[in-house]
Image (cartoon, rainbow, N blue to C red):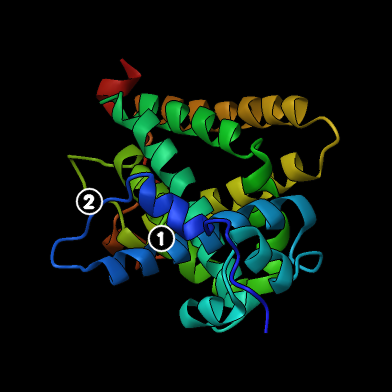
Amino acid sequence: MSKPSSKASAASKLLRGGLPSVPGAGRRAQFSAATKRALVDVAERLFTEDGYTGTSLDAIVAGAEVTKGALYHHFNGKRALFEAVFERVEGEAVRTILAAMKEHRDPWDKAVAGLRAFVDVVQQPGYRRVVVQEAPAVLGYEGVREQEERSSLAVVHDLVGQLLLDRQRPVDAGLVATFGRILFGALAAAGEVVAESEEPTDASRRVEIAFGYLISGMQLLREAGVTLPTAAELAEPDAPTPEPTDEARD
């Protein structure tokens, strides 16, 4: 039987470092939360450095200075732990993008600020490795999509709704959702371009320019008075495409 380590565990260090107290939670519950956080901290670092297949549970528990029993108390295996890391990295990216957008009121300015924040995020090693490179293979398309629908896709959909808002005529909701899906897919592809590039800074700059053109094109069309069809107009396939308003022509 091995002797207990005299070295404090990572969870103990987190707890001593001022883990936020949870109302009504005892010290055991707080220590459990610290253990879980330590496991996710170490797993995030190892998944970023060595990838999913190159990271073992033994390495994770050794880094967190806990037992495998403690790991299995919180996660049923490596995939579940990876999912927790993915959710954290994705969530932090979304919060960064939202913070950048929050500084602007105009939706077009928000779009540009959000794009620039996204470009910065995809250059971060953790995001590139965990979200872009590893997650599709580990979690599968559905697993990634479920998380994205709760976070980043929702942000894109909300922004597109603001960009396409027409106070004079209700734009078809399905069309707004389609715009959101297409734009989100393009952003995901852009993330792959950056992640796979040997020069991520240059690749990010190209992504920013390309999306800048797309956003500017949408803005120019709206300012020219080109309208999008309503649900009723979409139901009439032979209906003429809306023309710019007289006010816009002037």
Residue 245 image position (x, y, % from top left): 29, 30
Q: Amino acid at mark 2?
A: Pro
**Observer-nearest residue: 169 or 9?**
9
> Residue at the right extreme?
198
Question: Callout 2: few (<14), some (14-19), or many (20+) C-alpha neighbours within 10 Å?
Answer: some
State the SS at label 2. Answer: loop
**Observer-nearest residue: 69 or 91?**
69
Answer with left or right where residue 82 lies relative to residue 100: right
Q: Which residue is mark 2?
A: 170
Please name the residue shown 64% across and 75% down the image: 78
Q: Is residue 15 above or below residue 31?
A: above
Residue 142 image position (x, y, % from top left): 57, 76
Answer with left or right where residue 214 lies relative to residue 48: left
Q: Amino acid at mark 1?
A: Ala
> Where does the C terminus fall, quadrant-wise?
top left
Q: Which residue is mark 1?
A: 34
> Where does the N terminus fall, quadrant-wise?
bottom right
Residue 115 image position (x, y, % from top left): 51, 33
**Observer-nearest residue: 176 or 184?**
184
